[in-house]
Amino acid sequence: MGSKKYPHADYQKEPISRREFIKQGVAVAAMSAAAGYLMLAPENYPLSLRDVTGLRSQPKEKPFQLPDFRVPKEAGVFDIGIGRNGSVGVKLRKALDAIGGITRYIKPGDVVLIKPNVAFDRPPMLGATTNPEIIEELIRLLLVEGRAREVRVADNPIESPVDCFAKSGIRLATERAGGKVYLPDSNAFEILYTPGATLIEQWPFFKRPFQNVNKVIGVAPVKDHNLCYASMGIKNWYGLLGGRRNQFHQNIHEIVSDLSIMIKPTLTILDGTRILMKNGPTGGDPSDVKPADVIMAGVDPVAMDAWAFENLLERKEKLPEYLYKAEQKGSGKIDFRGRIKEVV
Amino acid sequence: MSLSRPITLQEKTRKFLRLTQVRVFSQVVFFGLFLFSVWATWTSRLEGYPVSRLLEMDPLVAVSTALSTGYIYRYLGWALGIIVLTFLFGRVFCNWICPFGTLHQFVNYLFNIQPNSKRIEQNRYHPAQYFKYAILVVFLIMAALGALQIGLLDPIVMMYRGFATFVSSAWNMLISAITPLFVRVGIEASWSDTLKFSPGAAHRIFVGSFWIGLWFLLFVALNLWKPRFFCRFVCPLGAFLGVLSRYSLFRINRDVTKCTDCNLCLTRCEGAADPQSMVRKSECFSCMNCIDDCPEDALQFTMIGLDRKQVVEAPDISRRRLVFAGITGLLAFPLLRNNGTATDENFSPHMIRPPGSVAEPEFLKKCIKCDQCINVCPTNVLQPATLKEGGFETLWTPVMNFNIGHCQLNCTLCSEVCPTGAIRKITVAEKLGKGEYTHKGPIVLGTAFINTTRCLPWANQIPCVVCEEVCPVSPKAIQTIDEEVKDVFGKMVVLNKPFIVPDLCIGCGICQHECPVQDDPAVYVTAIGESRSRSRRLLLHFRSSTSK
């Protein structure tokens, strides 16, 4: 028995038909050819996966550019309006009316982004963040008189975003007036290309809230700042950047002047209701704050910062260097004489 | 089952309203509450929800902290509810409430598919089930000596810690990994905004999350070897409730006249409690599965007409083993403490505790490592300690890592959620030393120092002072020496060289977090000067009246 009895009883011979053989052969050949093409075809061929230098597989950043959000100038309209006396709403309206009214800048159906300064987890009374009343009044004005379709409020604070927006009162003010808060998260940033910027030509930018936005308004408090003397309207745009912002202090004046060309806002509003006179930009004690009665609105952030530095922070020394640099870069003119209309 | 016999009303209703169905409902509700409390443990969602309540009603937490401190903190009295429930119905907590138990049961249900004969063998009582009582004894003796370690194995703590530092951050990471894929095909990302969905913020990181996750997953995976391995062999809370349940009024009772010894009651016995012979009260989870599975209707969960012979009341642990466990507990205490990190003799500069923490020896009597504080922290500064800061004893307790975040000035959330008072409930006024706390001064976590060999203005002639800018106290605890120098390239630069005013520094660490010399920051906070301990202070007196 045994050795002669081959094949084994359990062994079943299954012959392959010619048709089957050809089908399998073609399928195997086609798959090998496809795999071979993907692996071996030169890089510029369509669908080729080849990466000879190792550079093709490196992540590519596709920087985007921001449009110009300004509206065309009109003869006879002042560049800067200052509102004094009355409630926050009244002052804001006075300042805006002095430069042609909100409807000159906002058209029905616009999507407006407001950038307040919400850098720190502080109550509004400490003057480190934008006064939430201004945000609330401004959003109402934009939605009711400007007939804006949507108003968004966004900032990338230094401390926990949720807390900063909550404790500065900005979230409540925004939601009460019908706006929408955008908080930063890791996927919300993309590389912004700013032609002409010296140090931040390409830098991560808080892009998500900018989807479909056609008007941008910066609303900044006026604050003391040890390193760059003062943080006002231009420095406020720092809050739209991500990445390693803590390197900026190595050449802060160049950075701030870069910020002035990074974004060309429709309007800048300076919150002169609580001036942080010392211990800035964080403050921390009510005695650091001087109550004041001014709201500025305008289209020349350089001139506005210069005026606020001299008149609100009451500094008699030389203007911050970044204002001269910003002027050189064409963001505005420091000389504010004759361009301001004050409504008392 | 013969059809000739008329179906009784009892049989009819049992089909629709069985105890096991009520049990599953209870498990779903409590697991849901657990998930909600993890999700709500976050600055924008807290709104006064009692997110730590499951921990606060854990009797092992109450009993062991009572042993270590002599008191019952804040809401820990809620444990009475579970204790009373156990006296009435036995270890119902384990199979009706405990989210970790529910997780184990669910994993078995999904992945441990066996023929009935195999399941019956798996669910027989195993003598090694005594082991959990030994663990309990070790932990309680250590607690009585002042080293609270129950958190290593307490199931509620395991769940909170595992979800806070492993599951939720894994979830965050997966969402933010998937989102760009949607964006690529043109779907707006806001619906998958990590801030909206995940129980936490985007990109939170947790030091040692790997080991916490592994410890958690290990016990989940062991279900595939022995069903409910953790609950039967390890769980110290189950052991504690097992001791109580010998006095319970209700229990499973087997009617020996009906029983045919078919062993089918073992098919789904969760506790391996021998319902087929003398039911072990201390092992039974009151899951009621055996009642469902008995074809003869011989089993009942009742307090009336109990068969006194068919029961084992006490846990199955011999006196010798109890003594051995006791000695182990006695030795474990010095084993943990000998390195001196818990006392003031050899404390680590990195052992920086959250604001409101009590002095270190007291802290170690109270902290159960549930990591609720770490979950609620809005800046991610709170991290589970590794072996580096305080050795094994402080493993997974909260420490502040200022390279990751900083302690936000107006925030006291960690003290809000702490179930045991290791971080005592404080107000913002108390933290900042304002109002009625002016005379006590602010709570100080540590003190900042400048490493002048790495600081850009000090060492490299490059302007910087981010640290001074972000310092939140007024007047600032970081001041500068301003100098105009010609740098190496011949350019005149103004250098603001920072120095620390320790009288004013509260150790919040924002300077360290914002320092551009990121990997080994040029300004860094260490534990010295912390106000919670007299012997860890730095200054003899404060030089200014406006400081603390």
Image (cartoon, grey):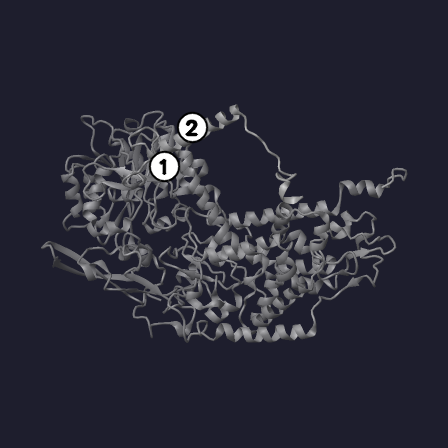
Front-lying residue, A331 or B490:
B490
Question: The numbered mark 1 sits on a residue in which chain?
Answer: A
Whole-percent x, y for residue A84 in the image: 27, 40
Residue A208 bears which disc, if any?
Answer: 1
Residue A221 bears which disc, if any?
Answer: none
Q: Residue furthest top?
A: A19
> N-terminal of the two: label 2 or label 1?
2
Whole-percent x, y for residue B397 in the image: 48, 62
Q: Is residue B78 above or below residue B330?
A: above
Q: Is residue A195 above or below residue B330?
A: above
Q: In the rendered image, is residue B123 in sight?
A: yes
Whole-percent x, y for residue B213 in the image: 50, 54
Which quarter of the figure has residue A117?
Answer: top left
Front-lying residue, B141 or B324:
B324
Which residue, given by chain and number where applicable, does mark 2 sit on?
Answer: A30
Q: Is residue B32 left or right of residue B186?
A: right
Secondary-structure class at tag 1: helix
Front-lying residue, B271 or B435:
B271
Residue at x-position 36% and y-position 60%? B508
Q: Residue furthest left?
A: B490
Whole-percent x, y for residue B214 in the image: 51, 56
